[in-house]
Amino acid sequence: MLEKDIENLIAKYPDEIFPNSGFKLIGQQIRLGKCYADIIFEDKHKRKIIVEVKRGILSRDASGQVLEYYGLLKTASPDEIVELVLCANIIPPERKKFLEAVGIECKELGLNFINRLAEKYNYDLRDSSKKEKLDIKSIIPSSDNIWIFQANPTRYDILNALADDKICSEIHWLVNQHKKDILKGHIGIIWLSGRESGIYAVTEIMTDPQIMAEPESEKKYWTDPSDKADDKLRVKMRIVRNLIGNPIIKESIRHTNGLGNLSILRCSQGTNFSVTQDEWNVIKTMIKDGG
């Protein structure tokens, strides 16, 4: 999904996100001085509510931009009551605390929530409509060795990385466990941890683990600059199935026969986890059936 999709759904169905608030839409992408407001509502108390939308995980830089934007709004309308609400898929707790301390309301709208909302109102998510429905057997190579590669949303914005055209079909990943077992030709499953836990992509591992730098196009998605270190043990992977528009969620996996003992469900500490062939067969069916 695109950031514009999230904006449109909020604008069209505010009661789903802000129940009992009586929001009435004034407009989208409205110029306010030097800034543009993603969405402006009027609430039942006749106050202006400005909604700023960020797709993916709210980064440190994005938090600073929102704070600067809020300051500009207050300066432009010193005598007017203006409330700012930030909506993002994932908002790290420390950033939420920081923004709410200065008066910016923060609201998490997870991908699952957005997908359900779009389905409820038959809203066609822009990027998903362009993706051809392919038989999973035709795009996922055969392998007896399957590995989970976990992304921590407080450290890496995998949602926006997977949606980035510059990254396209290739991504690099750290290998911290199973260093001698993960090899070229194996299958990699990209897993997001946290409240939106689940499977977000399937990959083919294109290299054996080796010390390599991360491309600049991927580095920018580390939320903490200290994590942007070069020359670590990584593999290069080709994304063969991007599930960002319809991820296989942890709760669904947990309650599916044959996946109760999945290694990452038993112990989620780490980066790399093994998957049995039987578990992979079940996961493939879930992907093919849309979760």
Image: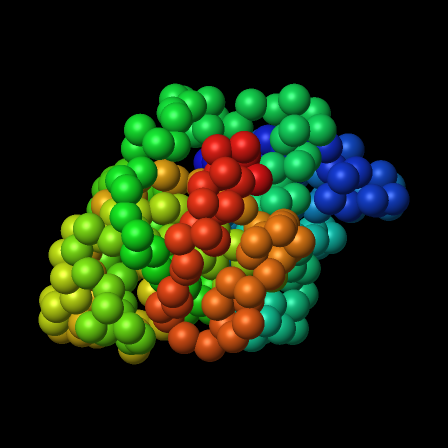
The total of numbered circles placed on residues is 0
Asked if residue 7 is positioned above or below residue 276 in the image, the reply reads: above
* In the image: residue 214, left or right of residue 130: left
* In the image: residue 124, left or right of residue 122: left
* In the image: residue 203, left or right of residue 160: left
Task: Name the one closer to the observer, 61 or 115.
Answer: 115
Residue 101 shows in the view:
yes
Q: Could you say where residue 143 lies in the image, as x and y percent from the top left?
A: 28, 48
The structure residue drawn at horizontal position 27% and vertical position 62%, both measured from the top left corner, is 173
Task: Name the one closer to the observer, 276 or 93.
Answer: 276
Tell me the quarter of the picture where residue 112 sits.
Answer: top right
The structure residue drawn at horizontal position 50% and vertical position 72%, both measured from the top left corner, is 268
Task: Name the one closer to the observer, 278 or 103.
Answer: 278
Q: Quadrant of the C terminus?
A: top right
Tell me the quarter of the picture where residue 95 sits.
Answer: bottom right
Residue 46 shows in the view:
no
Q: Could you say where residue 206 lies in the image, as x and y percent from the top left?
A: 17, 51
Q: Could you say where residue 130 lies in the image, as x and y percent from the top left?
A: 40, 22
The structure residue drawn at horizontal position 47% and vertical position 58%, both measured from the top left corner, is 192
Q: Could you say where residue 186 lies in the image, as x and y percent from the top left?
A: 25, 53
Q: Say how the picture is coloured.
A: rainbow
The structure residue drawn at horizontal position 46% and vertical position 52%, both measured from the top left corner, is 278
